[in-house]
Image: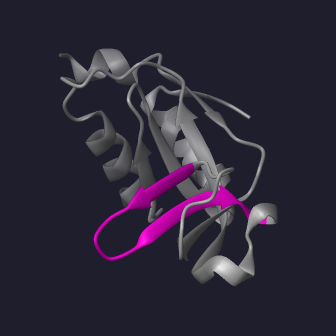
Amino acid sequence: MEIDRYIQGAEAYVWEQRYAVIKARHGFDDAFAVVVDKDETTVVIEEESVDSVDVIEVETGWRIITFDMILPFGLVGFMARVSSSLAESKIGIFVISAFSTDHILVKENDLEKSVRVLEGLGIAVRR
């Protein structure tokens, strides 16, 4: 599949809410994402919904950018192109892949710079 075809003219949007990424004792029903592996449970949740009783560690101040498009499983290099461009601008990301698309979390103080980088790739970003 041609990666440039997916990058040029792609669309994304920024979620309004601020999110926290937490190491938790269990998942949360209202979480954006929950990842459970053999060592920990990671929860991405709106900051206002964080319950300190069930939190082991927390990192706040994240914003979500969702790619508003279907990314086929056979598509190779989309996130590599996005993440390398953001890395060149010294922007760290937290990536969550869903069945049909991808989401990146960036720190709020990097949001505007992240949007400019994505737009520079040809991705239209709605806020």
Q: In the depicted view, which residue is nearer to us: 1 or 58?
A: 58
Left or right, 74 with respect to 123, comes to left
Image coords of residue 75 (percent x, y) = 22, 25
Q: Residue at x 17, y 16 (%)?
A: 1
Between 94 and 45, the residue placed more toward the observer is 45
**Residue 84 position within the rendered picture, expressed as x and y whole percent measured from the top left:** 31, 51
Residue 120, placed above or below residue 109:
above
Is the image coloured rainbow, by chain, by secondary structure, or in one colour? one colour
Q: Is residue 25 magenta?
A: no
Residue drawn at x 62%, y 79% as measured from the top left: 55
Q: Is residue 127 above or below residue 88?
A: above
Front one among 78 and 58:
58
Residue 28, percent across and down? 62, 59
Percent across and percent down for residue 116 are 58, 43
Left or right of residue 115, residue 88 in this image: left
The residue depicted at 30 percent of the width and 33 percent of the height is 78
> Total label count?
0
Task: Work out which residue is located at the far right of the displayed protein and give it.
Answer: 48
Quarter-wise, where is residue 62 in the image? Answer: bottom right
* 12 lies above or below 108: above
Q: Quadrant of the C terminus?
A: top right
For the record, the magenta segment spans 33-47
Left or right: where 80 falls relative to 46: left
Specify the principal SS of the magenta part: strand
User: In which quadrant of the rendered view does residue 5 lie?
Assistant: top left
Q: Is residue 16 left or right of residue 109?
A: right
